[in-house]
């Protein structure tokens, strides 16, 4: 299975996942594109994992990719100074070991107007409203996910959030009452790459050997839709 999350595709057909299949010369597989705002990678990962758990597929290539430069107003300093292009991918498959996995994904279309991007238009966001949403709803979501799995933040090695901006990420840390070191960030180097931000961060963490077997981490996505989701994974 190839599943791609993006908000910046300029072609309706074929989808990005089909183009990836063609480039990788894979003759037969399931392909799917996900349009779920900045946290689309979370939705894509969860869908892929569930297909694997049901025995429908053996492996899934989950991709987050963005070309936000095409949708950024260079005169809008609220977006131009932070949004960037990027891509990241995660290959997942079924393990013989029993590993913890849990997800909590919530959407709220009634408030979707605070972050929008229409065809042939540029990205628009209401900074104050986005900040309030990002530092309150995300914290509630993470706490609920932990409660559902009888865990505390002490059991979690890292939280890997969508790299929106440092102010939001620091606000989350304060409200969760955890040190900033427990939340992995790379936004100073990569910028905000929407759907690509979490897989890029994960790749960096594995390269730096920050993640070890049996570590528990939380992937946290939030943004346009409004869409919000967290995934608890045991490495």
Image (cartoon, grey):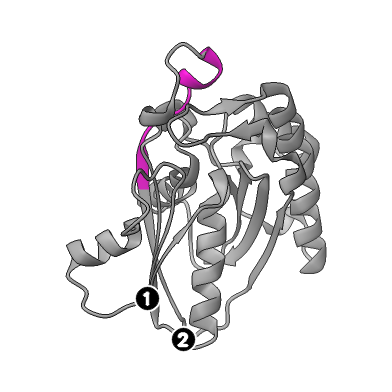
- Comparing 142 with 3, the one in front is 3
Q: Secondary structure at mark 2?
A: loop
Q: Which mark is residue 56?
A: 2
Q: Is residue 39 left or right of residue 127?
A: left
Q: Which mark is residue 30?
A: 1
First of labels 2, 1 by sequence position: 1
232 relative to 176, above or below: below
Point out residue 120 in the picture as x, y percentages from the top left corner: 42, 31
Q: Which mark is residue 222?
A: none
Point out residue 112 in the picture as x, y percentages from the top left corner: 69, 40
Q: Quadrant of residue 103?
A: bottom right
Q: In the rendered structure, does residue 83 fall within the stretch colored magenta?
A: yes
179 relative to 28, above or below: above
Nearer the viewer's eye, disc 2 or disc 1? 1
Residue under the point 42% across and 15% down: 74
Tell me whether the residue at label 2 lies in contact with that at label 1, contact meaning CB atoms closer than 8 angstroms: yes
Q: Residues within 10 Å of mark 1 (few under 14, many from 20)?
A: few
Residue under the point 51% across and 36% down: 118
Q: Residues within 10 Å of mark 2 (few under 14, many from 20)?
A: few
Point out residue 35 in the picture as x, y percentages from the top left corner: 51, 53
Residue under the point 65% across and 56% down: 230
Query: How far is the residue under mark 2 from the one under mark 1?
Result: 10 Å
Q: In the rendered structure, does residue 27 fall within the stretch colored magenta?
A: no
Classify the position of the N terminus by image quarter: bottom left
Please state the extent of the stretch shown in magenta in the rendering: 77-87
Point out residue 222 in the picture as x, y percentages from the top left corner: 63, 44
Q: Secondary structure at mark 1?
A: loop
């Amino acid at each position: 299975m190839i599943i791609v999350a993006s908000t910046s595709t300029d072609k309706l057909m074929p989808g990005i996942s089909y183009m990836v299949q063609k480039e990788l010369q894979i003759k037969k597989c399931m392909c799917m594109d996900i349009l779920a705002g900045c946290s689309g990678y979370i939705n894509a990962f969860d869908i892929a994992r569930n297909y694997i758990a049901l025995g429908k597929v053996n492996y899934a290539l989950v991709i987050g990719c963005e070309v936000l430069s095409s949708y950024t107003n260079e005169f809008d300093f609220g977006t131009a100074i932070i949004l960037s292009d990027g891509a990241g991918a995660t290959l997942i498959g079924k393990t013989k070991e029993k590993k913890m996995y849990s997800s909590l994904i919530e959407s709220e279309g009634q408030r979707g107007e605070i972050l929008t991007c229409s065809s042939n238009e540029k990205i628009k966001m209401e900074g104050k409203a986005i900040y309030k949403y990002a530092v309150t709803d995300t914290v509630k979501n993470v706490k609920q996910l932990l409660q559902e799995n009888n865990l505390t933040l002490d059991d979690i090695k890292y939280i890997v959030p969508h790299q929106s901006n440092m102010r939001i990420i620091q606000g989350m840390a304060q409200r969760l009452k955890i040190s900033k070191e427990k939340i992995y960030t790379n936004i100073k180097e990569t910028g905000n790459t929407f759907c690509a931000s979490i897989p890029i961060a994960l790749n960096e963490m594995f390269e730096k050997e920050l993640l070890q077997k049996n570590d528990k981490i939380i992937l946290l996505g939030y943004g346009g839709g409004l869409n919000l989701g967290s995934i608890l994974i045991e490495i």
